[in-house]
Amino acid sequence: MPEIQRTNLANVVLLLKSLGVKDLTTFDFMDPPPQDNVAQSLYQLWALGAVDDEGELTSLGRKMSEFPLDPPLSKMILVAEKLGCSADVAAIVSLLSVPQVFFRPRGREQEADAAREKMQVPESDHLTLLNVLRLWERHGRRAAWAQEHFVHQKGLSRASEVLGQLQDVMRQ
């Protein structure tokens, strides 16, 4: 089954709306998704404020479409800007965009759990991810530090790259 027929289409619908497609029911998809999926995506975009009651793109939706992210994540960044915490939220979003950064090697599970616990922020898993990224940066982004603390160096590096891309979009 083609992926477009089995995944959340909110990002695709937002992109099509930003490109000026008015009626998604007549759009010539190579493999048309079920109309229920399109309707659910439009509803999600409406709930996020990206489209209005007529299904037209809002100014918020236009800004959201600039980000290479799922719409809820792009809205998080835009709302964070208004709240003065966009740098931290963008970092968290970048970490959510990569595979799990923690690892637990067989036979060393207790060590890995203890290392993770030392970096944990009790209020939130998202803040724990942010804390890990900040600690890694403070320690010179060293692979040895990552290995010692049971976090994937490649995942943190990739999150850092994604963060750079998000910051570029935010500056624009």
Image (tube, grey):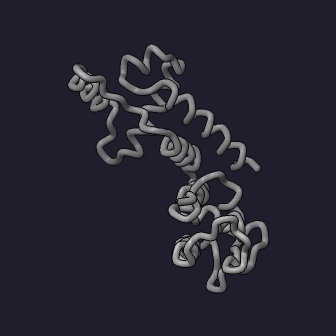
- Residue 130 is left or right of residue 125, and the answer is right
Task: Give the farthest residue toward the bottom.
Answer: 54
State the residue in front, 128 or 55: 55
Q: Is residue 168 above or below residue 63?
A: above
Q: Residue at x 78, y 67 (%)?
A: 19
Task: Name the one closer to the observer, 77 or 64.
Answer: 64
Q: Residue at x 33, y 40 (%)?
A: 121
The one of 10 and 27 positioned closer to us in this rendering: 27
Q: Position of residue 7 (x, y in %)?
A: 52, 61
Residue at image point 55% right, 74% down = 34
- Residue 116 image position (x, y, % from top left): 31, 30
Quadrant of the rendered structure where residue 135 is? top left
Residue 23 picture quarter: bottom right
Q: Position of residue 26 (x, y in %)?
A: 71, 79
Residue at 32% x, 47% y is 123
* Residue 55 drawn at (x, y percent): 65, 80
Whether residue 88 is visible here, answered yes or no, is no
Q: Is residue 158 above or below residue 77?
A: above
- Total of numbered circles in the picture? 0
- For residue 100, which quarter of the picture? top left
Residue most extreme to the top: 144
Would you place residue 104 above or below residue 12 in this image? above
Residue 96 visible in the picture: yes
Left or right, 130 with reference to 49? left
- The image shows residue 69, relative to residue 145, as above or below, that is below
